Image (tube, grey):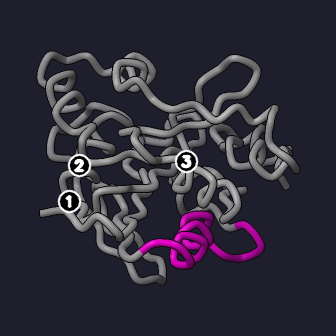
Amino acid sequence: MKKTNSITGIILAGGKSSRMGTNKALIPINNIPMIEQIINTLNFICDDIIVIANNDLPIKGNFKIQKDIIENCGPMGGIHAGLNASSSFKNIIVSCDAPYTNLKALQCLIDYTKNSNCTLFEHENKMHPLPGCYTTNCLPTITENLTQNKLKLRETVTSLNPKMINIEKLLFKNDYLKALININTPEDLKEFI
């Protein structure tokens, strides 16, 4: 039975980082690995933290590592593994390469997840699957799509009929927009720094 009042944080860190050329999760921002900073942020609102990674990570923090159950499926496989391992009904899912992950954005996602299985941000009519608040009710659809080799995250998330939070309508929208930024390439990193 999943706990209804707890929140689990799930960090997707199992990607190959092929465009970056090095493990994105371990890139230091102000001398602290990016993923460690995200773990520190999640600790403020999450009861448990699960990092989806296929290798051990040399980082500090109170978290457990979970490997993909169905391998080589990209973010969909990571979300699937995280929701399976979670002991909570509601789960905040973020990417390991999002240096501006912040409490305001994450708490907004949690607060809006009432009578909805999935809550996401929308900006300029574009849905952003991460960060997002996903309940474990999403698992059957995600599992079915994975077994049918339907790996496109946006298509699966759209089929979950997510509740959308339009960032344009929020006060102090820059705090929410920052949470959507991720670092995929050396050029992105240079621009961020």
Left or right side of 89 for 187: right
Q: Which residue is mark 2?
A: 81
Q: Above or below — where is 84 with respect to 181?
A: below
Quadrant including the C terminus: bottom right
Q: Amino acid at mark 2?
A: Ala
Q: Which residue is mark 1?
A: 85
Left or right side of 182 for 124: right
Q: Amino acid at mark 3?
A: Tyr
Give the percent coordinates (x, y) of residue 54: 28, 55
Q: Which residue is mark 3?
A: 112
Q: Separation of disc 2 and disc 3 at Cα?
A: 24 Å
Left or right side of 118 for 34: right
Quadrant including the N terminus: bottom left
Give the percent coordinates (x, y) of residue 63: 37, 76
Quadrant in the rendering for residue 33: bottom right
Left or right side of 145 for 29: right
Q: Separation of disc 1 and disc 3 at Cα?
A: 23 Å
The front one of 121 and 77 is: 121
Write the start and end of the magenta stretch as one range.
29-46
Magenta run includes residue 53: no
| Residue at 51% in and 53% down | 23
The front one of 48 and 24 is: 48
